[in-house]
Image (tube, rainbow, N blue to C red):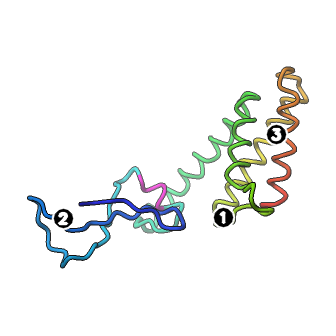
Amino acid sequence: TIRAEHDPEGNVHYLFGHVASKLSIPTNGEEIELFLNYGPIYENVRLRKGYSELSGEAKKKKLKELQKEDESYMEEVDCFSGENVVDCIRFFVDLFLSEKQSRYTPVSEMVRQRSVAIISRLRQRAQDILMFKEEPTMVDSINDSVARAEELLKDLK
């Protein structure tokens, strides 16, 4: 049988163990880990995490494409509604802030940097919505979200 298990860092490991069945692959009675190739679609994740098999110019080209995708996504934030901004900031608060701890959950440097960038953009979008009075019924929620975003940014920087 094959089963998935998460390690403490959240990575999924697929384990293969022998169970009496029609399928017979010798494993000497021990579980072994299966390594999967998720194909070219997963290459963006491999690049961001630093274990891409691309080399030289192909890697540089793909990294530039990823940078453009990131910039495009950040520009989309400028069109978010107040409700979208509030929901996104709440997501980051829930992700990093533990009710049981006085500190935020530790994250990798890459995740921290990317989170700071998007939270900053969300905060700016929230401030723009307030300044231009785009959504008068959401003023309180947006003000609260700006305050929470600033708290997150202070702790993550």
- Disc marking residue 145: 3
Of residues 16 and 127, the one drawn nearer to the viewer in this rendering = 16
Residue at 81% across, 60% down: 155
Q: Amino acid at mark 3?
A: Ser
Q: Answer with mark 3 or mark 1, whichever residue precedes in sequence.
A: 1
- Disc marking residue 107: 1
Q: Amino acid at mark 1?
A: Val
Total count of labels: 3
Magenta residue check for 45: yes
Q: Is residue 65 left or right of residue 24?
A: right
| C-alpha separation, residue under disc 1 versus residue under disc 2 | 38 Å
**Residue on which the image places disc 2:** 19
Of residues 14 and 73, the one drawn nearer to the viewer in this rendering = 14
Residue at 75% across, 54% down: 99
Q: Give the magenta part as a residue range.
A: 42-46
Q: Residue furthest left?
A: 22
Look at the image and tell me in which quarter the N terminus lies.
bottom left
| C-alpha separation, residue under disc 3 versus residue under disc 1 | 22 Å
**Residue 3 on image: x %, y %:** 32, 59
